Image (cartoon, coloured by chain):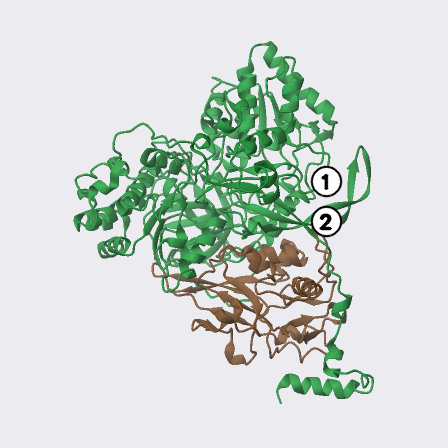
Chain colours: A green, B brown
Amino acid sequence: MDRRSFIKLTAISGTGAALASCGAPENEIIRFVPDEDIMPGIATMKPSVCTLCASGCGLTVRMMMADADVVRDGQSGLVRIHAAKKLEGSADHPVNHGGLCARGQAAIQVTYHPDRITQPLKRTGDRGQGQYDAISWDDAIAELVSRLDMLASASNQKSLAFLSRGRRGHRAALIDRFLAAYGAPGAITHELFNDDVVRRANALSFGRDQLPAFDLPNARYVVSFGADFLGTWNSPTAQGYGYGLMRQGRTGIRGMFVQVESRMSQTGANADQWIPVKPGTEGVLALGLANVIMTAKLRPASAGGRAGTLIAGWSSGLTDFAPEQVEQITGVTAARVERLARELVETSPSVAMIGGSPLAHTNGLFNALAVNALNALLGSVEQRGGLFFTPQINLTAAAKGLAGRASAPSSLDRAAAAILDGSFVPQVLLLDGANPVFTSPKGWGVREALTKIPYIASFGSFLDETAALSDLILPDHSFLEGWTEALPESGSMIAVASVAPAAMMPLHQTRATPDVLLDVGRRLAKPLNLPWENFEALLTETFSALPTTSTFDTWTDAQEKGGWWGMLPPALATAAAPAAQTKPLAFSEPRFDGDAGQYPLHFLPYASSAFLDGSLAHLPWLQEMPDPLTSAMWSSWIEINTATAAKLGIREGDIVEVASSQGALRTSAIVSPGIAPDVVAMPVGQGHQRFTRYATGRGENPLELLAPLADSETGNLAWAATRVRITRVGDPDGRLILFAGGSREEQDRGR
Amino acid sequence: MPKWGMAVDLDRCDGCSACVTACHAENNISTVGADQAARGRAKHWIRVERYWEGEFPDVRLKFRPVMCQHCENAPCEPVCPTYASHHTEDGLNAQVYNRCIGTRYCANACPYNVRFFDFFNPSWDKPLHLQLNPDVSLREVGVMEKCTFCVQRIKAATIQAKAEERKVADGEIKPACAQACPARALVFGDLDDPESAVSRLSRSSRGSKLLEDRGTEPAVTYLSRQS
């Protein structure tokens, strides 16, 4: 007799009399609610599109009834609404295939966030204090209109600036068209982890100004240079799906995976081989692999094609990158370079990818071009198991009204510099989605620059560091409350446009920003010539232009499915456009801010699993989600190599001061074997001065230490090029909160 | 009668933690905040454990998602004085919240550390409460809670199948964690059906049970990572 049977028997004998009439007493004892009495709630499922990152994953929203305190037509009261209850990945969507990342799961908390801005606000206190009075939508729009009319009557339309994250899609296209029609320059864009270096490299090497997609399910060998492609980079859910199939989706074939990086990322933890390299030398390793392949005549140099010609010394076999020299520069042994190169060729199809910190050095473009050339040499471009470019819809071809665009987007650092030196100060700034006061290095002077702009209006839903500088707030709907859309730049082999109508009624007195812009355009003294009544009209126009894939018309079908995907007619596709040939690029040593003697450690900020660039730090589920590599919750920390920590007398949890030439901060130490001895790493996302009750004043912002270095070719921020020093300043003070350890999970690292 | 179980392919799992948040979203698990989390009171019915091996540069890290193992021979059940922790005939290790008197004997007995005690009444800053799933009961102070294999989803699918006079199809039921998993590392289903995906995976030569030597006979099989 086993234990359970024994327990059951004693239980039965104890209560046997009471249950004598029951047929199967051992069942009856533990019955709680009979099946017949369970009434699962009736849910309806609606499509939606996640907008927390640029991937454009399709959602299925589980909707049920709920009683909500809402304001309708100025009256507040308890109303039974159809409320979103759970976000699930849309099963058929070509990007996420039914999966949904942790951030996407938490996206529902954006809609229900207690600190959302619920109605238009007008500033009353000083800028940055966050004191506002409620005003009506009519007054708010009238105020913005009068500001724009004032500019127009002074023929100063070019002094209107728009600051956004610069994502692709209908919203960005409409904003661009609005600016062009008004006579303003194109938007200023800022995204900290923006991948512009990869886009530029792909435009040069392959004529595609976009992020690549990877055919992981058919790949047999993947080498990733710094790309956290299973965590935070590019299209993580699409790549996670592909990764599962690459490992276990084929009988008898298991794809191999090598990660090259100096701090083990969540992605790197899954690698078969994890290869640390000196920061900024990733491109050298890629060329070392190419050298071995060419020298051993496994593939001819000519296979490099156009991508090869962009690398100095390519056609002569990259003689400067023999394995021994590569070992000198990168720290990866010559034997390992040889072996890796042979494995890449012998285990085809193979593919290389680059993302994250290798691009964020002063030689970022070189690193990207080197990996592109390696891919071309391996024959992995647009080939099964290799690298692809998701066909992109040409919106201007689909919606004629979008013709006539504003000038190309400008970068925030240049815009801020122009404001600070007085050469160009916008008179009105519209702010949509970006929070550059938090996500840019102090050296750019973004906060100082923004305060010089006389008038700022924000469309954001939350009062963050940047929005707090605004004079007027016109809060947007959440993505569940209005039209939501995305044009995924990657993550799919076929063209895809995600779109969905509102899943639920707005909870608050908010309005969809695209509709507000169209409304403002109509109300100007000289109305703008924008042909759409509202955002829906633009979406209707572009989606109706796409070929139908079912018995319904395209637009009806897209709304039902949450998007359109399929074969894109050439007339609607963005054509490949080779960027002007530049002279071949040679390796240049990465430059770092801070003297190596005074600041001996490389400082590596990285996109945190929970918060990416910090824009999601306001969601409590993500704050309490244990970090995959450390199990830390609600915290900031800095990762230090085990031996380095021992040398500096630092133990886990100790408070350390991290100092760069730009400033210093104090945070908790996590001692880790998964990081190079001369590198320290800190997740980005915490350290908000103002960002809702959950994130304000919590942790530290590593970006405050960044020197404003840039990639020498593209001018993109080199956020991995700062050096720091670390000093122990105190014992653990309880600010580092780990889920593991103690009674939970044995953790014995670095002690 | 089905016997519910799960297979976790550690060769697919990449540690992304989508399952952790999905579980919160589905099961009305309240966040406790920084101060209570620091006291070890955060509740994660599923967690991703990490195992470091070696020292730099030859260092490895392996992830393992751990949830209630729904043991056939569950150590948490016989210690419960009120039968709040009990076994259902379809193989679930169930917890009846309003029978639980909070002795926490079950948490002591559980070798997997997957049971969580509610140290206070849950609260949601309004209107976060509008997200709560009406199919899942809220747990009050003094109650033990843990992974249920999303019993509400099992019930809903079973009732639906019964109404349509058919059997529950393999793959029809997906707990929130398995549904969210981008890499399809988590597979749920009926272990009593030898042809179900979970049965086939559970028979894999890569398979093993967590702390097998404890004799708990878990319903969760881990398929080892291949590198």
Tell me: B224 left or right of A343.
right
Is residue A359 rendered to the left or right of residue A71? left
Q: Amino acid at mark 1?
A: Leu
Gap in angstroms between the C-alphas marked 1 and 2: 10 Å
Residue at x-position 64% and y-position 37%? A462
Q: Type of residue at label 2? A: Leu
Question: Which element type, helix, strand or loop, lies under badge 1?
Answer: loop
Q: Residue at x 56, y 60 (%)?
A: B178
Residue that badge 1 annotates: A507
Q: From the top left corner, tell me how far across and down residue B124 is, in percent.
A: 71, 52
Which numbered disc covers residue B130?
Answer: 2
> Does residue A264 appear in the picture of this structure?
no
Asked whether A664 or A436 is in front, the reply is A436
**A332 vs A313, nearest the viewer:** A313
Mark 1 nearby-residue class (10 Å; few <14, some 14–19, many ≥20): many
Q: Is residue A271 above or below residue A417?
A: below
